[in-house]
Image (cartoon, grey):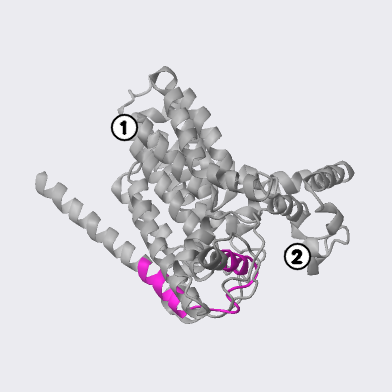
Amino acid sequence: MKRITERTRWVTLLVFACIFFSGFYLRVRSVTETVVVHPLRADAGDYFRYAYNLHYKNTYSREMGDMKDLHSPVTPDGVRSPGYPFFLTFFVDGLSLHSFVQKVVLSQAILSGLTILLSYLLFKSFLPAAWALAACLLVALSPHLIIPNSFLITEPLFCFILLVIGCVVSLFASRPSAILALLTGILIGLASLVRPILEYLPFLLGFWLLVQYRRRGGFRYGAALLFGFFLAFFPWILRNAITLGAFSDDTLLINFFHHGMYPNFTFDGAPESYGYPYLFDPRSPAISKDLGSVLSEILRRFQERPWEHLSWFFVGKPVAFWSWDDVQGMGDAFIYPVASSPYFSNTFFQWTLIFTFAIHWPLILLGAFASLPAWLSSSDRIFSQRSLFVTRFMSLVLVSYTFLHMFGAPIQRYSFPLRPYLYGMAVFLAYFLWQRTLTMRRLSNTSPPPRP
């Protein structure tokens, strides 16, 4: 028996090594062979300017100024959160933009490779080894976790931090402590500095911990988590208050609501406006003037065409958010135009693309319904309390993140960092259904014969 267990452990380790190195190979080869057309365009350009000014001028600003004059003044702002630009400061290398981009994308490929390892550690906390390996394989092959590494966008870093948070939560589920709750809060604060939409999660988790543990430390754990979050996030708020005279800049929040208010991503159904309807709306300047204006416009549109907007907000947006193609990209997970990619020519890459595309919607549906068994009391017969705690945390992240994008712009790239959580939950539901089937068969085989 001991020999069988040891053999199983070695087989598991060998399979994981194959998955890990295959995924790592895909990531490194993708970033080294993908040629992005104008890599510092749009959001990426902003992130670079923030990083450049932070590195050389100690000023958080997206103004370019005079790059050759390191002392040329720039005006500070707070339009974008500082997490990703701060990460980029480690790779700023004078005026060598090509060197800068190459260092960033390679580092993102490495971080993305580490997410494979973190994913397996997380999945092992609520799934048997074979099932955890299956979910890990999905993470390793997913083009939505590989292609974005070639672009200067927040998604690779945000995905990595999300997986670290998940692993810390799995440790907390085994041995709850205020220290681990504090660390979870700090990590969520750091993640919120990369993608601000996560800043609402600590309050939801704090309430959940209070309900989950009650007198057994619920208040202490919840308070520690919130304190950790503010410890990481408050310096950004303080900086804005001192430098800008306001706690935050509402520009991106206004855009978030504004860009997501158009049904099916089109302006009045015009096909040529798909993906960028706000550019075709002549009233866009007035709508996006301030937060009150955009919310008033959304309310007005609901009153004029209630059913169209209800179906878009509560059905169309979740479907769009988890769709395969990025609405503003060039297909698949390509955010910006590329001149070349191994996904265009390499057979292995193409086969992984075909495979993951074929199972995309089944995985989405499994992941969408996985929250139900996670919260069912009857699941205690199949899963340990630790397993249910971790899956409930993951379901809270997935559901709350999707819910918030139902009110704003459901851009598909924003869902990319959540894919490891989704894959884990999809396999969790498959395993749950498998165990229920086995249980039903076992009961039917042991039940007494019917009376004549």
Q: Main secondary structure of the magenta part?
A: helix
Nearer to me, 171 or 308? 171
Mark 2, residue position: 274
Query: In the displayed structure, does residue 414 sit left or right of residue 22?
Result: right
Mark 1, residue position: 175
Q: Secondary structure at mark 2?
A: loop
Magenta residues, start to end: 24-50
Q: Please provide percent x and percent y for residue 35.
A: 52, 80
Q: Amino acid at mark 1?
A: Arg
**35 relative to 197, above or below:** below
Nearer to me, 221 or 262? 221
Query: In the displayed structure, does residue 437 sit left or right of residue 60?
Result: left
N-terminal-most mark, 1 or 2: 1
Residue neighbourhood size for the residue with mark 2, other residues' Cα within 10 Å, grouped as few (<14), some (14–19), many (≥20): some
Residue 208 appearing in the image: yes
Residue found 66% across the figure and 55% down from its top = 79
Residue 403 among magenta residues? no
**What is the quadrant of the C terminus in the image?**
top left
**What is the quadrant of the N terminus in the image?**
top left
**83 relative to 406, above or below:** below
Residue found 59% across the figure and 79% down from its top = 37
Q: Amino acid at mark 2?
A: Tyr
Quadrant in the picture for residue 303: top right
